[in-house]
Image: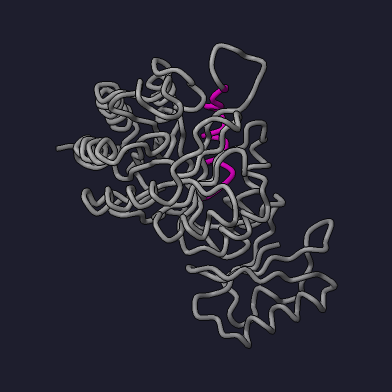
Amino acid sequence: MLILLKKGATDDQVAAVEERVRQAGLTPGLVPGKARTAITVTGNWGEAMIPDVRSMPGVMRAIRVSKPYRLATAEAADARTEIAIGEALVGSDNAWFVAGPCSVDEESRLLETAHYLKSLGAQALRGGAYKPRSNPYAFQGHGEPALQMLARAREATGLPIVTEAMDLEQLAMVEEYADVVQIGARNMQNYSLLKRVGRSSKPVILKRGLSASVDELLNAAEYILKEGNCHVILCERGVRTFASHSRFTLDVAAIPVLKALTHLPVIVDPSHPAGVRNLVRPLARAGIAAGADGLLVEVHPEPEHALSDADQALRYADVASLAAEARGISQVLNRSFGADAD
């Protein structure tokens, strides 16, 4: 069961509800949120029976939740979650457009790319300062200098910054610079990191793990929500399968499945499953057509000079075509895509 409290519920009212839960032989869990406080109820195998809890002062409603992820489930919300990031409202009828280099390499290139992407209607700039690499000798990112370059690109263009934190030590520094913290696929089940980002004031993009099920992704989101951060965006980025025709297999079906199971926004990253440039646009089109709330794509003006993921980075002409295609598909679905292009 999930007990949703009214806005402005007093400490005494919250304490009274928690005591009523304990009297029923169950365990309350207080989940403070910026929008509304909730109390999770655990310790029951079937439907929780708590006498008169729905009529107690401060209680808005009590919901029987059929999934272990009590806060992420669609049953826990009256409407889909919308998250304000810069001028965008992620999860609304406007599909979010985020683009930029896999890793930040050189400042003049980054600034040039940011200005160009904004002219196409991009609403946020992505760029890696810290990079998880399978090969320990591969480029690992420029660290804080890259974060500083991203901050200057934001100042020059007004685009919010999306960048990844790989561990607790990096997270504190990323929070100083970023507007959105990304938790990558390899850290989807790093529960210490999820709990800590759950106490952050920054919105979070949570990427699906390389071999994770949809339920595992939602349970990972629950770790963040349970700590009080309700600004979570799920990202489908492909999973590992026996197929060898692409880097990963983009699970397009997961997009409508997730949107039926959760109230959280669901975006798609077509770059990582593609692995090669010519697959990115078709996968992006499929994601938008399936109902994704946004695209997260890798772009570089000179991919031959990129320090990571050069093969899948879109050139300027590629991303311009992608933006036009995504707008056309979105219009068919009665949505818009990105900001107005210059």
Q: Residue at x 26, y 25 (%)?
A: 316
Is 43 placed left or right of 70 in the picture?
A: right
Residue farthest toward the front in the current orientation of the protein = 137
Total numbered badges shown on the rendered structure: 0
Magenta includes 259?
Answer: yes
The picture places residue 174, in percent across and down from the top left corner, at 46, 55
Q: Residue at x 37, y 48 (%)?
A: 92
45 and 32: which one is in front?
32
Colouring chosen for the image of the structure:
one colour
In the picture, the quarter occupied by the C terminus is: top left
Q: Residue at x 64, y 78 (%)?
A: 55
- Which image quadrant for residue 243? top right
The magenta stretch is 248-263
Q: Is residue 69 above or below residue 260?
A: below
In the picture, the quarter occupied by the N terminus is: bottom right
Is 58 placed left or right of 66 in the picture?
A: left
Magenta includes 124?
Answer: no
- Which image quadrant for residue 227? bottom right
222 and 276: which one is in front?
276
The picture places residue 74, in percent across and down from the top left corner, at 57, 50
Q: Is residue 95 above or below residue 312?
A: below
Q: Is residue 62 above or below residue 204?
A: below
Residue farthest toward the top in the current orientation of the protein = 245
The picture places residue 305, in percent across and down from the top left corner, at 35, 25
Residue farthest toward the left in the current orientation of the protein = 342
Q: Residue at x 73, y 71 (%)?
A: 28
The picture places residue 341, in percent across and down from the top left corner, at 18, 37
